[in-house]
Protein backbone atom coordinates (compact mmCIF):
# COMPACT_ATOMS: atom_id res chain seq x y z
CA UNK A 1 0.00 0.00 0.00
CA UNK A 2 1.30 3.46 -0.89
CA UNK A 3 2.30 5.52 2.16
CA UNK A 4 1.66 9.24 2.44
CA UNK A 5 3.60 11.77 4.51
CA UNK A 6 0.39 13.59 5.45
CA UNK A 7 -1.55 10.49 6.46
CA UNK A 8 -4.36 11.05 8.99
CA UNK A 9 -5.75 7.54 9.28
CA UNK A 10 -4.45 4.15 8.20
CA UNK A 11 -6.41 0.91 7.97
CA UNK A 12 -4.24 -2.23 7.91
CA UNK A 13 -5.51 -5.69 6.99
CA UNK A 14 -8.99 -5.00 8.44
CA UNK A 15 -11.50 -7.87 8.60
CA UNK A 16 -15.06 -7.57 9.93
CA UNK A 17 -16.96 -10.83 10.41
CA UNK A 18 -20.59 -11.46 9.49
CA UNK A 19 -23.04 -13.73 11.36
CA UNK A 20 -23.17 -17.34 10.19
CA UNK A 21 -25.62 -18.31 7.47
CA UNK A 22 -24.98 -15.47 5.02
CA UNK A 23 -23.54 -15.62 1.50
CA UNK A 24 -20.06 -14.72 2.79
CA UNK A 25 -18.16 -14.82 6.09
CA UNK A 26 -16.88 -11.22 6.16
CA UNK A 27 -18.39 -7.77 5.57
CA UNK A 28 -14.84 -6.46 5.08
CA UNK A 29 -11.93 -8.77 4.31
CA UNK A 30 -8.22 -7.89 4.75
CA UNK A 31 -8.86 -4.29 3.79
CA UNK A 32 -6.13 -1.63 3.54
CA UNK A 33 -6.65 2.11 3.18
CA UNK A 34 -5.19 5.52 4.00
CA UNK A 35 -7.05 8.79 4.48
CA UNK A 36 -4.80 11.76 3.95
CA UNK A 37 -4.97 15.44 4.75
CA UNK A 38 -6.74 17.80 2.32
CA UNK A 39 -8.04 15.02 0.04
CA UNK A 40 -11.47 13.71 -0.88
CA UNK A 41 -11.31 9.94 -1.11
CA UNK A 42 -14.40 8.36 -2.68
CA UNK A 43 -15.25 4.75 -1.84
CA UNK A 44 -17.59 3.18 -4.41
CA UNK A 45 -19.24 -0.18 -4.80
CA UNK A 46 -22.66 -1.82 -4.81
CA UNK A 47 -24.87 -2.29 -1.76
CA UNK A 48 -23.36 -4.98 0.44
CA UNK A 49 -19.82 -4.31 -0.75
CA UNK A 50 -18.74 -3.33 2.80
CA UNK A 51 -18.39 0.44 2.29
CA UNK A 52 -20.55 1.53 5.20
CA UNK A 53 -19.30 -1.19 7.57
CA UNK A 54 -15.73 -0.12 6.91
CA UNK A 55 -16.67 3.50 7.69
CA UNK A 56 -18.61 2.53 10.82
CA UNK A 57 -15.64 0.55 12.11
CA UNK A 58 -13.57 3.76 12.03
CA UNK A 59 -16.21 5.44 14.21
CA UNK A 60 -16.63 2.44 16.54
CA UNK A 61 -20.27 2.19 15.46
CA UNK A 62 -20.49 -1.34 14.08
CA UNK A 63 -23.79 -3.20 14.67
CA UNK A 64 -23.66 -5.60 17.65
CA UNK A 65 -23.65 -8.73 15.45
CA UNK A 66 -20.55 -7.55 13.58
CA UNK A 67 -17.04 -7.35 15.00
CA UNK A 68 -13.48 -6.62 13.93
CA UNK A 69 -11.66 -9.96 13.88
CA UNK A 70 -8.36 -8.84 12.41
CA UNK A 71 -6.34 -5.76 11.57
CA UNK A 72 -5.70 -2.25 12.82
CA UNK A 73 -7.17 1.22 12.51
CA UNK A 74 -4.60 3.90 13.33
CA UNK A 75 -5.51 7.55 13.74
CA UNK A 76 -2.53 9.92 13.80
CA UNK A 77 -0.30 7.01 14.79
CA UNK A 78 -2.53 5.69 17.62
CA UNK A 79 -4.51 2.45 17.49
CA UNK A 80 -8.24 3.21 17.86
CA UNK A 81 -10.13 0.02 17.04
CA UNK A 82 -9.64 -1.32 20.60
CA UNK A 83 -10.85 1.80 22.39
CA UNK A 84 -13.60 1.67 25.02
CA UNK A 85 -16.94 3.37 24.21
CA UNK A 86 -15.95 6.27 26.49
CA UNK A 87 -12.59 6.68 24.72
CA UNK A 88 -14.32 6.57 21.34
CA UNK A 89 -16.65 9.31 22.50
CA UNK A 90 -13.64 11.59 22.86
CA UNK A 91 -12.71 11.05 19.22
CA UNK A 92 -16.18 11.17 17.64
CA UNK A 93 -17.12 14.64 16.53
CA UNK A 94 -13.92 16.22 17.78
CA UNK A 95 -11.38 14.40 15.60
CA UNK A 96 -13.48 12.24 13.27
CA UNK A 97 -17.05 13.16 12.32
CA UNK A 98 -19.65 11.38 10.21
CA UNK A 99 -22.55 12.49 8.02
CA UNK A 100 -25.17 9.77 7.54
CA UNK A 101 -27.22 9.02 4.41
CA UNK A 102 -30.55 9.73 6.06
CA UNK A 103 -30.30 12.61 8.55
CA UNK A 104 -33.72 11.80 10.05
CA UNK A 105 -32.26 8.60 11.50
CA UNK A 106 -29.30 10.48 13.02
CA UNK A 107 -31.13 13.57 14.31
CA UNK A 108 -33.20 13.45 17.50
CA UNK A 109 -36.83 14.30 16.58
CA UNK A 110 -37.48 15.57 20.13
CA UNK A 111 -34.77 18.23 20.13
CA UNK A 112 -34.33 21.37 18.02
CA UNK A 113 -31.46 21.60 15.54
CA UNK A 114 -29.76 24.25 17.69
CA UNK A 115 -29.94 22.11 20.84
CA UNK A 116 -28.42 19.10 19.08
CA UNK A 117 -25.47 21.12 17.78
CA UNK A 118 -25.09 22.73 21.19
CA UNK A 119 -24.84 19.31 22.88
CA UNK A 120 -21.87 18.42 20.67
CA UNK A 121 -19.99 21.51 21.85
CA UNK A 122 -21.09 21.05 25.48
CA UNK A 123 -19.55 17.56 25.43
CA UNK A 124 -16.23 18.48 23.85
CA UNK A 125 -15.51 22.18 24.59
CA UNK A 126 -15.36 24.62 27.49
CA UNK A 127 -17.29 27.33 25.61
CA UNK A 128 -20.03 29.11 27.56
CA UNK A 129 -23.66 29.26 26.42
CA UNK A 130 -23.28 32.59 24.60
CA UNK A 131 -20.15 31.43 22.78
CA UNK A 132 -21.81 28.14 21.77
CA UNK A 133 -24.88 30.00 20.45
CA UNK A 134 -22.67 32.30 18.38
CA UNK A 135 -20.64 29.37 17.05
CA UNK A 136 -23.82 27.48 16.05
CA UNK A 137 -25.15 30.49 14.12
CA UNK A 138 -21.79 30.89 12.36
CA UNK A 139 -21.72 27.23 11.35
CA UNK A 140 -25.33 27.20 10.09
CA UNK A 141 -24.46 30.27 8.01
CA UNK A 142 -21.30 28.55 6.72
CA UNK A 143 -23.41 25.70 5.29
CA UNK A 144 -25.64 28.29 3.58
CA UNK A 145 -28.84 27.62 5.49
CA UNK A 146 -31.41 30.38 5.06
CA UNK A 147 -32.31 32.20 8.29
CA UNK A 148 -29.97 30.31 10.69
CA UNK A 149 -31.79 31.67 13.75
CA UNK A 150 -35.03 30.08 12.60
CA UNK A 151 -33.31 26.80 11.71
CA UNK A 152 -31.81 26.68 15.22
CA UNK A 153 -35.31 26.71 16.71
CA UNK A 154 -36.73 24.21 14.24
CA UNK A 155 -37.16 20.49 14.83
CA UNK A 156 -35.84 18.06 12.16
CA UNK A 157 -39.29 17.35 10.67
CA UNK A 158 -39.92 21.08 10.18
CA UNK A 159 -37.17 21.60 7.60
CA UNK A 160 -36.57 20.06 4.14
CA UNK A 161 -34.33 17.08 3.34
CA UNK A 162 -31.64 19.32 1.86
CA UNK A 163 -31.76 21.59 4.92
CA UNK A 164 -31.50 18.59 7.28
CA UNK A 165 -28.45 17.39 5.37
CA UNK A 166 -26.85 20.85 5.70
CA UNK A 167 -27.65 20.84 9.42
CA UNK A 168 -25.92 17.43 9.71
CA UNK A 169 -22.86 18.83 7.93
CA UNK A 170 -22.85 21.81 10.30
CA UNK A 171 -23.03 19.45 13.29
CA UNK A 172 -20.24 17.28 11.88
CA UNK A 173 -17.93 20.26 11.26
CA UNK A 174 -18.71 22.33 14.37
CA UNK A 175 -15.58 21.03 16.17
CA UNK A 176 -13.43 21.22 13.01
CA UNK A 177 -12.58 17.50 12.84
CA UNK A 178 -9.51 16.32 10.96
CA UNK A 179 -11.51 13.63 9.13
CA UNK A 180 -15.05 13.86 7.76
CA UNK A 181 -16.83 10.63 6.76
CA UNK A 182 -19.83 11.18 4.49
CA UNK A 183 -21.94 8.04 3.88
CA UNK A 184 -24.14 8.51 0.79
CA UNK A 185 -24.99 12.10 1.83
CA UNK A 186 -26.61 13.05 -1.50
CA UNK A 187 -28.42 9.86 -2.59
CA UNK A 188 -31.97 11.01 -1.88
CA UNK A 189 -31.48 14.65 -2.91
CA UNK A 190 -32.59 16.31 -6.13
CA UNK A 191 -29.97 17.42 -8.61
CA UNK A 192 -29.77 21.11 -7.59
CA UNK A 193 -29.63 20.39 -3.83
CA UNK A 194 -27.09 17.64 -4.54
CA UNK A 195 -24.88 20.10 -6.44
CA UNK A 196 -25.07 22.59 -3.56
CA UNK A 197 -24.12 19.93 -0.96
CA UNK A 198 -21.17 18.70 -3.05
CA UNK A 199 -19.88 22.25 -3.55
CA UNK A 200 -20.31 22.91 0.16
CA UNK A 201 -18.33 19.81 1.21
CA UNK A 202 -15.57 20.59 -1.28
CA UNK A 203 -15.28 24.25 -0.14
CA UNK A 204 -15.33 23.42 3.58
CA UNK A 205 -12.77 20.65 3.01
CA UNK A 206 -10.40 23.07 1.27
CA UNK A 207 -10.85 25.80 3.89
CA UNK A 208 -10.16 23.46 6.80
CA UNK A 209 -7.64 21.08 5.15
CA UNK A 210 -9.91 18.21 6.18
CA UNK A 211 -9.50 14.65 4.98
CA UNK A 212 -12.82 13.43 3.55
CA UNK A 213 -13.97 9.82 3.15
CA UNK A 214 -16.96 10.05 0.80
CA UNK A 215 -19.02 6.88 0.31
CA UNK A 216 -21.29 6.71 -2.74
CA UNK A 217 -22.56 4.48 -5.56
CA UNK A 218 -23.06 7.48 -7.90
CA UNK A 219 -20.22 7.83 -10.40
CA UNK A 220 -21.50 11.26 -11.45
CA UNK A 221 -20.88 12.42 -7.87
CA UNK A 222 -17.49 10.70 -7.91
CA UNK A 223 -16.49 12.48 -11.12
CA UNK A 224 -17.55 15.78 -9.56
CA UNK A 225 -15.78 15.59 -6.20
CA UNK A 226 -13.15 12.83 -5.91
CA UNK A 227 -9.38 13.27 -5.73
CA UNK A 228 -8.83 9.54 -5.29
CA UNK A 229 -11.14 6.51 -5.69
CA UNK A 230 -11.30 3.14 -3.96
CA UNK A 231 -13.56 0.43 -5.40
CA UNK A 232 -14.99 -2.28 -3.11
CA UNK A 233 -16.64 -5.60 -3.98
CA UNK A 234 -17.79 -8.24 -1.51
CA UNK A 235 -15.73 -6.72 1.29
CA UNK A 236 -12.54 -6.58 -0.79
CA UNK A 237 -10.62 -3.61 -2.17
CA UNK A 238 -10.35 -4.26 -5.92
CA UNK A 239 -8.94 -0.94 -7.17
CA UNK A 240 -7.35 2.18 -5.67
CA UNK A 241 -6.18 5.00 -7.90
CA UNK A 242 -6.18 8.69 -8.76
CA UNK A 243 -9.73 9.79 -9.68
CA UNK A 244 -8.98 11.05 -13.17
CA UNK A 245 -7.05 7.92 -14.11
CA UNK A 246 -9.58 5.46 -12.67
CA UNK A 247 -12.60 7.17 -14.26
CA UNK A 248 -11.00 7.19 -17.68
CA UNK A 249 -8.90 4.00 -17.56
CA UNK A 250 -10.39 1.56 -15.02
CA UNK A 251 -8.16 -1.49 -14.62
CA UNK A 252 -10.30 -4.02 -12.76
CA UNK A 253 -13.12 -5.79 -14.64
CA UNK A 254 -15.58 -4.99 -11.81
CA UNK A 255 -14.78 -1.25 -11.99
CA UNK A 256 -15.25 -1.42 -15.75
CA UNK A 257 -18.65 -3.09 -15.28
CA UNK A 258 -19.76 -0.38 -12.83
CA UNK A 259 -18.71 2.47 -15.12
CA UNK A 260 -20.35 0.77 -18.12
CA UNK A 261 -23.63 0.82 -16.17
CA UNK A 262 -23.61 4.61 -15.60
CA UNK A 263 -26.37 6.27 -17.70
CA UNK A 264 -24.81 8.74 -20.11
CA UNK A 265 -26.18 12.07 -21.24
CA UNK A 266 -26.41 11.14 -24.89
CA UNK A 267 -30.11 11.31 -25.62
CA UNK A 268 -31.97 9.19 -28.11
CA UNK A 269 -33.50 10.89 -31.13
CA UNK A 270 -37.22 11.52 -30.77
CA UNK A 271 -39.82 11.76 -33.49
CA UNK A 272 -43.27 13.30 -33.55
CA UNK A 273 -45.82 10.63 -32.67
CA UNK A 274 -48.95 10.47 -34.81
CA UNK A 275 -50.74 8.30 -32.26
CA UNK A 276 -53.73 9.65 -30.33
CA UNK A 277 -53.55 11.23 -26.88
CA UNK A 278 -54.27 8.63 -24.21
CA UNK A 279 -54.16 10.83 -21.11
CA UNK A 280 -54.85 14.56 -21.06
CA UNK A 281 -54.15 16.68 -17.99
CA UNK A 282 -55.82 20.09 -18.24
CA UNK A 283 -55.20 22.91 -15.72
CA UNK A 284 -54.71 20.46 -12.83
CA UNK A 285 -54.53 22.00 -9.35
CA UNK A 286 -53.76 20.64 -5.90
CA UNK A 287 -53.65 22.73 -2.73
CA UNK A 288 -52.23 21.94 0.68
CA UNK A 289 -52.52 23.65 4.03
CA UNK A 290 -49.33 24.31 5.95
CA UNK A 291 -48.38 26.12 9.12
CA UNK A 292 -46.80 29.54 8.87
CA UNK A 293 -43.32 29.56 10.32
CA UNK A 294 -41.84 26.67 12.21
CA UNK A 295 -43.94 26.85 15.35
CA UNK A 296 -46.84 29.07 14.38
CA UNK A 297 -50.44 27.95 14.53
CA UNK A 298 -51.75 30.03 11.65
CA UNK A 299 -52.07 28.27 8.32
CA UNK A 300 -51.38 29.23 4.74
CA UNK A 301 -52.45 27.63 1.47
CA UNK A 302 -49.80 26.20 -0.83
CA UNK A 303 -50.52 25.50 -4.48
CA UNK A 304 -48.48 22.30 -4.91
CA UNK A 305 -49.73 21.76 -8.47
CA UNK A 306 -50.57 24.92 -10.40
CA UNK A 307 -52.61 24.62 -13.63
CA UNK A 308 -50.52 21.76 -15.02
CA UNK A 309 -51.21 20.76 -18.63
CA UNK A 310 -49.81 17.57 -20.18
CA UNK A 311 -50.70 15.22 -23.07
CA UNK A 312 -49.48 11.60 -22.98
CA UNK A 313 -49.83 9.73 -26.27
CA UNK A 314 -50.14 5.99 -26.89
CA UNK A 315 -46.75 4.26 -26.51
CA UNK A 316 -45.03 7.48 -25.42
CA UNK A 317 -42.72 8.00 -22.41
CA UNK A 318 -42.73 11.45 -20.82
CA UNK A 319 -40.24 12.27 -18.09
CA UNK A 320 -41.40 14.56 -15.30
CA UNK A 321 -38.31 16.18 -13.76
CA UNK A 322 -37.63 18.85 -11.17
CA UNK A 323 -36.51 19.44 -7.60
CA UNK A 324 -38.09 17.80 -4.57
CA UNK A 325 -41.26 19.69 -3.76
CA UNK A 326 -41.85 20.79 -7.36
CA UNK A 327 -45.11 18.81 -7.55
CA UNK A 328 -44.04 15.78 -9.63
CA UNK A 329 -45.29 13.04 -7.30
CA UNK A 330 -48.42 15.04 -6.47
CA UNK A 331 -49.39 15.03 -10.17
CA UNK A 332 -48.87 11.23 -10.27
CA UNK A 333 -50.94 10.65 -7.15
CA UNK A 334 -53.76 12.78 -8.56
CA UNK A 335 -53.78 10.68 -11.77
CA UNK A 336 -54.22 7.39 -9.86
CA UNK A 337 -56.53 9.09 -7.33
CA UNK A 338 -54.43 8.34 -4.28
CA UNK A 339 -55.22 11.97 -3.52
CA UNK A 340 -58.00 14.17 -4.86
CA UNK A 341 -57.30 17.22 -7.01
CA UNK A 342 -58.71 20.70 -6.34
CA UNK A 343 -59.21 21.89 -9.89
CA UNK A 344 -58.81 21.04 -13.56
CA UNK A 345 -59.38 17.79 -15.43
CA UNK A 346 -57.61 14.47 -15.95
CA UNK A 347 -59.11 12.93 -19.08
CA UNK A 348 -58.61 9.25 -19.81
CA UNK A 349 -60.67 7.62 -22.55
CA UNK A 350 -62.33 11.07 -22.81
CA UNK A 351 -63.73 10.72 -19.29
CA UNK A 352 -62.69 12.96 -16.38
CA UNK A 353 -61.05 10.84 -13.67
CA UNK A 354 -61.33 13.66 -11.13
CA UNK A 355 -65.14 13.39 -11.18
CA UNK A 356 -65.27 9.62 -10.65
CA UNK A 357 -66.22 7.94 -7.39
CA UNK A 358 -64.54 4.78 -6.11
CA UNK A 359 -66.91 2.41 -7.94
CA UNK A 360 -66.72 4.14 -11.32
CA UNK A 361 -62.93 4.40 -10.98
CA UNK A 362 -62.45 0.62 -10.67
CA UNK A 363 -62.15 -0.19 -14.41
CA UNK A 364 -59.66 2.63 -14.87
CA UNK A 365 -57.46 1.53 -11.95
CA UNK A 366 -56.80 -1.59 -13.98
CA UNK A 367 -55.56 0.44 -16.93
CA UNK A 368 -53.50 3.03 -15.03
CA UNK A 369 -50.92 1.45 -12.73
CA UNK A 370 -48.14 2.90 -10.57
CA UNK A 371 -44.67 1.74 -9.53
CA UNK A 372 -43.45 3.45 -6.37
CA UNK A 373 -39.99 4.69 -5.34
CA UNK A 374 -39.86 2.48 -2.28
CA UNK A 375 -41.09 -0.97 -3.37
CA UNK A 376 -40.79 -2.37 0.15
CA UNK A 377 -43.22 0.20 1.54
CA UNK A 378 -45.79 -0.66 -1.14
CA UNK A 379 -45.52 -4.48 -0.84
CA UNK A 380 -47.60 -6.38 1.72
CA UNK A 381 -45.09 -8.24 3.94
CA UNK A 382 -47.71 -10.87 4.85
CA UNK A 383 -48.31 -12.00 1.27
CA UNK A 384 -46.04 -14.09 -0.89
CA UNK A 385 -44.79 -12.53 -4.09
CA UNK A 386 -47.08 -14.78 -6.12
CA UNK A 387 -50.12 -13.73 -4.08
CA UNK A 388 -49.28 -10.05 -4.50
CA UNK A 389 -48.82 -10.21 -8.27
CA UNK A 390 -51.97 -12.31 -8.70
CA UNK A 391 -54.05 -10.17 -6.32
CA UNK A 392 -54.92 -7.43 -8.84
CA UNK A 393 -56.24 -9.73 -11.58
CA UNK A 394 -58.26 -11.72 -9.00
CA UNK A 395 -59.88 -8.52 -7.66
CA UNK A 396 -60.81 -7.59 -11.23
CA UNK A 397 -62.56 -10.91 -11.86
CA UNK A 398 -59.85 -13.23 -13.18
CA UNK A 399 -59.92 -16.84 -11.99
CA UNK A 400 -57.36 -17.70 -9.35
CA UNK A 401 -55.47 -20.35 -11.34
CA UNK A 402 -55.18 -18.08 -14.39
CA UNK A 403 -54.05 -15.16 -12.18
CA UNK A 404 -51.27 -17.26 -10.67
CA UNK A 405 -50.22 -18.50 -14.12
CA UNK A 406 -49.97 -14.87 -15.21
CA UNK A 407 -47.97 -14.03 -12.05
CA UNK A 408 -45.51 -16.82 -12.86
CA UNK A 409 -45.05 -15.56 -16.45
CA UNK A 410 -44.57 -11.96 -15.29
CA UNK A 411 -42.00 -12.93 -12.68
CA UNK A 412 -40.13 -14.77 -15.45
CA UNK A 413 -40.44 -11.64 -17.61
CA UNK A 414 -38.86 -9.42 -14.92
CA UNK A 415 -36.02 -11.88 -14.39
CA UNK A 416 -37.04 -13.46 -11.07
CA UNK A 417 -38.46 -16.80 -12.18
CA UNK A 418 -41.07 -19.06 -10.62
CA UNK A 419 -38.93 -19.69 -7.52
CA UNK A 420 -39.97 -16.21 -6.36
CA UNK A 421 -43.68 -17.16 -6.23
CA UNK A 422 -43.69 -18.55 -2.70
CA UNK A 423 -41.19 -16.22 -1.11
CA UNK A 424 -41.87 -13.03 0.87
CA UNK A 425 -40.74 -9.44 0.06
CA UNK A 426 -38.15 -9.28 2.88
CA UNK A 427 -36.27 -12.16 1.25
CA UNK A 428 -35.35 -10.01 -1.75
CA UNK A 429 -32.87 -7.18 -2.40
CA UNK A 430 -33.94 -3.62 -3.26
CA UNK A 431 -33.47 -4.20 -7.00
CA UNK A 432 -35.43 -7.46 -6.85
CA UNK A 433 -38.27 -5.80 -4.92
CA UNK A 434 -38.44 -3.13 -7.61
CA UNK A 435 -38.87 -5.92 -10.18
CA UNK A 436 -41.69 -7.38 -8.04
CA UNK A 437 -43.38 -3.96 -7.97
CA UNK A 438 -43.09 -3.79 -11.75
CA UNK A 439 -44.54 -7.32 -12.20
CA UNK A 440 -47.47 -6.43 -9.92
CA UNK A 441 -48.22 -3.26 -11.90
CA UNK A 442 -48.04 -5.13 -15.22
CA UNK A 443 -50.34 -7.94 -14.03
CA UNK A 444 -53.39 -5.88 -14.95
CA UNK A 445 -52.17 -5.19 -18.52
CA UNK A 446 -52.16 -1.41 -18.00
CA UNK A 447 -52.25 1.05 -20.85
CA UNK A 448 -50.43 3.62 -18.72
CA UNK A 449 -47.61 2.97 -16.27
CA UNK A 450 -46.63 5.72 -13.83
CA UNK A 451 -43.13 5.15 -12.45
CA UNK A 452 -42.30 7.42 -9.48
CA UNK A 453 -38.51 7.47 -8.92
CA UNK A 454 -38.33 3.71 -9.59
CA UNK A 455 -34.51 3.49 -9.66
CA UNK A 456 -33.31 6.39 -7.48
CA UNK A 457 -32.23 4.24 -4.54
CA UNK A 458 -30.61 1.46 -6.59
CA UNK A 459 -26.94 0.71 -7.25
CA UNK A 460 -25.73 1.79 -10.67
CA UNK A 461 -25.54 -1.80 -12.00
CA UNK A 462 -29.00 -2.77 -10.66
CA UNK A 463 -30.36 0.54 -11.95
CA UNK A 464 -29.06 -0.26 -15.43
CA UNK A 465 -30.68 -3.73 -15.29
CA UNK A 466 -34.08 -2.35 -14.20
CA UNK A 467 -34.03 0.39 -16.86
CA UNK A 468 -33.08 -2.10 -19.58
CA UNK A 469 -35.83 -4.44 -18.41
CA UNK A 470 -38.37 -1.62 -18.34
CA UNK A 471 -37.46 -0.65 -21.90
CA UNK A 472 -37.76 -4.24 -23.14
CA UNK A 473 -41.14 -4.79 -21.47
CA UNK A 474 -42.47 -1.46 -22.71
CA UNK A 475 -41.48 -2.34 -26.25
CA UNK A 476 -43.17 -5.74 -25.92
CA UNK A 477 -46.40 -4.56 -24.26
CA UNK A 478 -46.52 -1.04 -25.83
CA UNK A 479 -47.89 0.85 -22.83
CA UNK A 480 -47.47 4.60 -22.26
CA UNK A 481 -45.34 5.77 -19.34
CA UNK A 482 -45.04 8.81 -17.11
CA UNK A 483 -41.54 8.52 -15.66
CA UNK A 484 -40.86 10.70 -12.61
CA UNK A 485 -37.23 11.28 -11.69
CA UNK A 486 -34.75 13.81 -10.34
CA UNK A 487 -31.90 12.03 -12.17
CA UNK A 488 -31.48 13.70 -15.55
CA UNK A 489 -29.03 11.00 -16.69
CA UNK A 490 -31.82 8.44 -16.34
CA UNK A 491 -34.33 10.77 -18.02
CA UNK A 492 -31.98 11.18 -20.99
CA UNK A 493 -31.92 7.41 -21.52
CA UNK A 494 -35.57 6.57 -20.96
CA UNK A 495 -37.80 9.43 -22.11
CA UNK A 496 -39.17 10.55 -25.49
CA UNK A 497 -40.19 13.91 -24.03
CA UNK A 498 -39.31 15.76 -20.84
CA UNK A 499 -41.59 18.06 -18.84
CA UNK A 500 -39.76 20.28 -16.35
CA UNK A 501 -41.62 21.19 -13.16
CA UNK A 502 -40.80 24.12 -10.89
CA UNK A 503 -42.88 25.31 -7.93
CA UNK A 504 -45.95 23.40 -9.06
CA UNK A 505 -45.83 24.48 -12.72
CA UNK A 506 -44.55 22.90 -15.91
CA UNK A 507 -42.11 25.56 -17.10
CA UNK A 508 -40.85 23.71 -20.18
CA UNK A 509 -41.76 20.63 -22.18
CA UNK A 510 -40.18 19.21 -25.32
CA UNK A 511 -38.40 16.31 -26.95
CA UNK A 512 -35.58 14.98 -24.77
CA UNK A 513 -32.84 15.76 -27.26
CA UNK A 514 -34.09 19.34 -27.65
CA UNK A 515 -34.37 19.90 -23.88
CA UNK A 516 -30.76 18.86 -23.29
CA UNK A 517 -29.27 20.59 -26.33
CA UNK A 518 -31.25 23.82 -26.27
CA UNK A 519 -33.12 24.44 -22.99
CA UNK A 520 -35.38 27.47 -23.15
CA UNK A 521 -36.19 28.12 -19.50
CA UNK A 522 -33.54 29.34 -17.07
CA UNK A 523 -34.59 26.72 -14.52
CA UNK A 524 -34.09 23.90 -17.06
CA UNK A 525 -30.62 25.27 -17.77
CA UNK A 526 -29.87 25.34 -14.03
CA UNK A 527 -31.00 21.69 -13.68
CA UNK A 528 -28.79 20.52 -16.54
CA UNK A 529 -25.80 22.51 -15.25
CA UNK A 530 -26.27 20.89 -11.82
CA UNK A 531 -25.88 17.30 -13.09
CA UNK A 532 -22.90 15.89 -11.14
CA UNK A 533 -19.97 14.90 -13.33
CA UNK A 534 -21.67 16.47 -16.35
CA UNK A 535 -18.35 17.06 -18.12
CA UNK A 536 -16.97 13.57 -17.48
CA UNK A 537 -16.83 11.51 -20.68
CA UNK A 538 -17.54 7.89 -19.78
CA UNK A 539 -14.89 5.88 -21.70
CA UNK A 540 -17.38 3.08 -22.42
CA UNK A 541 -20.30 5.15 -23.69
CA UNK A 542 -18.80 8.38 -25.04
CA UNK A 543 -17.81 8.71 -28.67
CA UNK A 544 -15.88 11.87 -29.44
Image: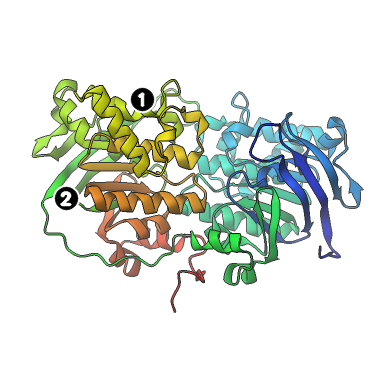
Query: In the figure, residue 205 lies in which quadrant?
Result: bottom right
Q: Quadrant of the N terminus?
A: bottom right
Residue for point 43% across, 33% down:
420
Residue at numbered disc 2 = 314
Q: Determine the residue located farthest toward the right in the rendered image.
A: 78
Looking at the picture, tell me which residue is in the foreground, 354 or 411: 411
Query: Does residue 379 appear left or right of residue 287 in this picture?
Result: right
Percent position (x, y) of residue 26?
A: 72, 41
Asked if residue 307 is positioned above or below residue 32 in the image, the reply reads above
Residue for point 88% across, 36% down:
83
Residue for point 61% across, 41% down:
167
Residue at disc 1, secondary structure: helix
Q: Determine the residue located farthest toward the bottom in the rendered image.
A: 544
Residue at numbered disc 1 = 387
Q: CA distance from mark 1 to mark 2?
A: 30 Å
Does the image show residue 360? yes
Query: Does residue 346 appear left or right of residue 263 in this picture?
Result: left
Percent position (x, y) of residue 397?
A: 19, 23
Does the image show residue 302? no
Amino acid sequence: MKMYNNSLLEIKNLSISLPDGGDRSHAVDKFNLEIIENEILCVVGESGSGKSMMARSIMGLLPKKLKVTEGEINFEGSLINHLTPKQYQEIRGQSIAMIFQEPMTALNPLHSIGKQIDEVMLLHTSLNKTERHKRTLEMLSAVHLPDPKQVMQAYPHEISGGQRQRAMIAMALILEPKILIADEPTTALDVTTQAQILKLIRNLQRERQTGVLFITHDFGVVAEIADRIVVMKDGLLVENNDAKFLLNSPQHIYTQQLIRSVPNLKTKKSFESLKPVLLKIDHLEKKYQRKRGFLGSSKSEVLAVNKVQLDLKEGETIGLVGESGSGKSTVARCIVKLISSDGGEILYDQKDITKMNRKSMMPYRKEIQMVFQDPYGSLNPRLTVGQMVAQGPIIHGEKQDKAFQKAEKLLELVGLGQQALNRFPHEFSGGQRQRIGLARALALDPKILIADEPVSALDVSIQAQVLKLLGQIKQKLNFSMLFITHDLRVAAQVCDKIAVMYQGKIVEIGYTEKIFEDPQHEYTTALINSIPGRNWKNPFTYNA
